[in-house]
Image (spheres, rainbow, N blue to C red):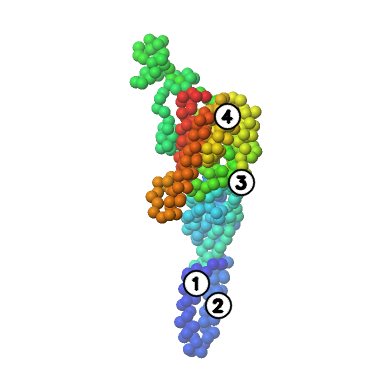
Amino acid sequence: MIPTKRLWALFAAGIPIAVISAVAGQGWVIYAYNGMLLVAAWITSRMSPDITHLRAVREFDPVLSVRAANRIRLRLVNDGVEPLRGRLRDEPPASFETEHCEFPLHLEAGAERTYSYDTIPPSRGADYFRGTFLRLACPLGLVERQLKLPTEQPVRVYPNVLALREFDLLKQKGKLRDLGIRVSRMRGLGSEFESLREYALGDDIRKVDWKATARRGKLIVRQYEQERNQPVLIAIDIGRRMLSEVNGVTKLDHVLDALLMLTHAASAAGDLVGLLVYSDRVHRYIPPRKGRNQMGFIIEAIHDLLADPVESDPMGAFAYLAARWKRRSLIVNFTDVETGEEGQRLASALGSLVRRHIVLTARIADPRLQELVEASPSRPETFFRKASALQFVDERREAGAALSAAGMHHLESEPQELASALVSFYFHVKEKSLL
């Protein structure tokens, strides 16, 4: 039973009554007045509508995306004979950033209504919704009755799966450039014949089909499609280097978001996708396969990954991979080597693979470093910060040079651009038929 403003106002109105009754020597009057209010409040609270026939169903995606706005829908169905008035509040996990999850409740008998709000999970993992709370208005408006609906519900938070929907939508509209993904406008790439079409300015004259040209009386070229069933294998270092944070988020979390986009792009193109997770040992290995089920297996394998405070062993991890996978592939290795010496060690670990496969090492750049490098120091401590940043940037540049000298591709990108840069590189490999 929750008192309303009306009840408190009526209690306040009893102050002058108390003063008058005290002056008149009739102090019992105020006690009787307050007692009547309390009895009325208790009686009306027992007259609140029955919610036995109220059904509540919470609807959301099977998994929520970390650091993204996830839409939650709460559907209420009143199968009773009384209308319901009051307020409604849904309770997502306490760590979620949620606004506007409280609503006025007006639900007639036999009616149905859906309430929607957005919530942002700050980290991956498992949690639960704590229920739905109602405050029902009672007759006379003296009190509200607070009730809880049994809508406790577990929820799992994964890397940003919602970004995949945006990718699909923009791809259908031919607007992948809106995501920063560079797609060549060249036509006729690939080696698998797809169809015939009329010649367009800039087409390779070697693609002209002279028989079809003679039949139709105009230049006709063969249109080729990119090859499918090509393996893409993604390796993730979850050692101590991936514990560091960029913009308050661990590098591992940034990697997982980018990995999802790359995996989805490759799967949508009909290619085989595999996964290798390692630190000082191999944690998980999923051989490259194609299909939606494979995408699901990979998402399940990465959703609960945590970085270990241990030194990684890329030599052992890639020896493990070389023994189990021979077919030429695009291997994308997510790690974070910071010095030329570390770059040389990684190059040695990947040396045997470079001769057979296309190897890309992807690292996450910290935008704060660039800010420190470009800053104009005005105090002694800012000089030291800039000098340290310059030294660190030089060391990372040496690491990248060591990787490039070993014959592998190297990509360093800020978190918000990493996914688009990876997908652009993947499309480049496909367009040039490098596999």
Tell me whether the residue at label 1 lies in contact with that at label 2, contact meaning CB atoms closer than 8 angstroms.
no
Amino acid type at image mark 1: Leu
Residue 200 visible? The answer is yes
Q: Quadrant of the N terminus?
A: bottom right
Nearest to viewer (mark 3 / mark 2): 3
Amino acid type at image mark 3: Pro
Provide residue 301's location: percent of width, then percent of height. 61, 39
Amino acid type at image mark 2: Gly
> Could you give the CA–CA distance between mark 1 and mark 2, rounded to whole angstroms?
12 Å
Tag shown at residue 7? 1
Tag shown at residue 351? 4
Nearest to viewer (mark 2 / mark 4): 4
The residue pinned by badge 2 equals: 35
Q: Nearer the viewer, residue 235 or 35?
A: 235
Name the residue: 37% across, 18% down: 199
- Identify the element where label 3 is drawn: loop
Amino acid type at image mark 4: Gly
